[in-house]
Amino acid sequence: KRKIILDCDPGHDDAIAILLAAGHEAIDLIGITTVAGNAELEKTTLNALKVCEIAGIDDVPVLKGNSQPLIRKRETAADIHGDSGMDGPVLPYPLKQAGEEHAVDFIIRTVMESDGDITLVPVGPLTNIAMAMRREPAILSKIQEIVIMGGGTFGNWTPAAEFNIYVDADAAKVVFESGVPITMMGLDLTHQALADRHVCSRIAEIGNPAAGFVSELLTYFRKTYLEFFGFEHPPVHDVCSVAYCIDPTVVETKKLRVDIETKGELTYGMTLVDLHGVTGREPNVNVALKLDHEKFWNMLIETLKQYK
Ligand code: BDR
Ligand code: CA
């Protein structure tokens, strides 16, 4: 089993990523850490707890992380995810509570206690991961891999920048320059993970509470993705990172140089992906470029069926 810590800001697609990680037999989900991103920290944490409760995920701790980016003012994505960060499904207030330990302490402690076999899967702004790296640099050589959802060769929050990188590009810079093996699920890849009508009806047919919840998430996400971006079908970005941890052959990747822009007037938060090797700099990121659509959706749908 692959041990992962899922660092997230639920978030419609984050919620589905939690369900895939907790439900698939190839993954040992050792913790869910939360960060401010799609909504404020209190909301993303509450949403993570709600996801655990509806799906009966009671053996995975949820740890609260940073409420603010390292340097910039906080920015959220209410236009896409609603004011709660996970608008659409109506869920009861969860009994489950977040753990006492701070997410950054949890990440440092579990990585340091490990045999170097933990993968970090950040699918929100990179604040917690960067803070952990700065607070305890000894974790760098012990992290197996970081599988990021973020960035791409184009943007969605600005023409240049993807949301997760844009919200805390300073943190992204720390992480991308860390020397830890990084795989990046950028928009080039995640815009191929579209929940089309056929996929949605397969999920609707499953008939358990977890799948019903996913259907409601996708209904809401479909609406905002159409209104805001003009997309016919919503992309489930964050699920791609977990799918890669389960089976790396679900994507095709290429090792490329990626640098983070933190100074540009118009390009703040851009991931500069050196597709043609023009910088001559050492490639530092495994960039995912092509998704196996069928394998991806089969993996998610079969996992959702496992829930009671
Ligand atoms: C990313 O931003 C968030 O809105 C999604 O949850 C995803 O992590 C896509 O740009
Ligand atoms: Ca997210």
Image: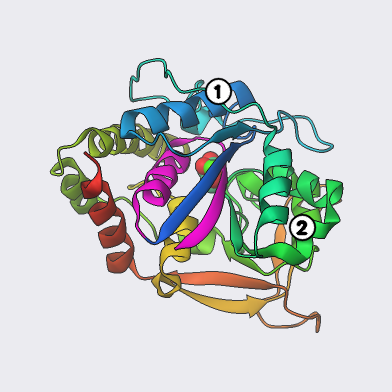
Q: Quadrant of the N terminus?
A: bottom left
Q: Residues within 10 Å of mark 2 (few under 14, many from 20)?
A: many
Name the image quarter holding residue 225.
top left
Circle number at residue 72: none
Could you tell me how many numbered marks the image carries?
2
User: In the figure, residue 291 lies in which quadrant?
Assistant: bottom left
Residue located 19% across and 53% down the image: 198
Give how far across and how far down residue 210 sits, in percent.
Answer: 27, 37
Q: Is residue 42 above or below residue 281?
A: above
Extent of the magenta region? 1-25
Query: Which residue corresponds to mark 2?
Result: 139
Going by the image, does 286 lie left or right of 3? right
Quadrant in the picture for the C terminus: top left
User: Which amino acid type corresponds to the residue marked 2 in the rendered image?
Assistant: Ile
Residue 172: x %, y % from top left: 74, 52
Instruction: Please say whether residue 23 is one of the residues in the magenta stretch.
Output: yes
Q: Which mark is residue 43?
A: 1
Viewer-side residue, 222 vs 20: 20
Q: Is residue 52 left or right of residue 126?
A: left
Q: Answer above or below: position of 145 versus 57.
A: below
Say what secondary structure mark 1 lies in: helix
Q: Residue at x 71, y 47 (%)?
A: 109
Indicate the secondary structure of the residue bearing disc 2: helix
The residue located at (47%, 28%) in the rendering is 49
Earlier sequence position, callout 2 versus callout 1: 1
Residue 148 visible here: no
Q: Amino acid at mark 1?
A: Lys
Expressed as whole percent of the image width and height from the top left, the position of residue 43 reads 55, 23
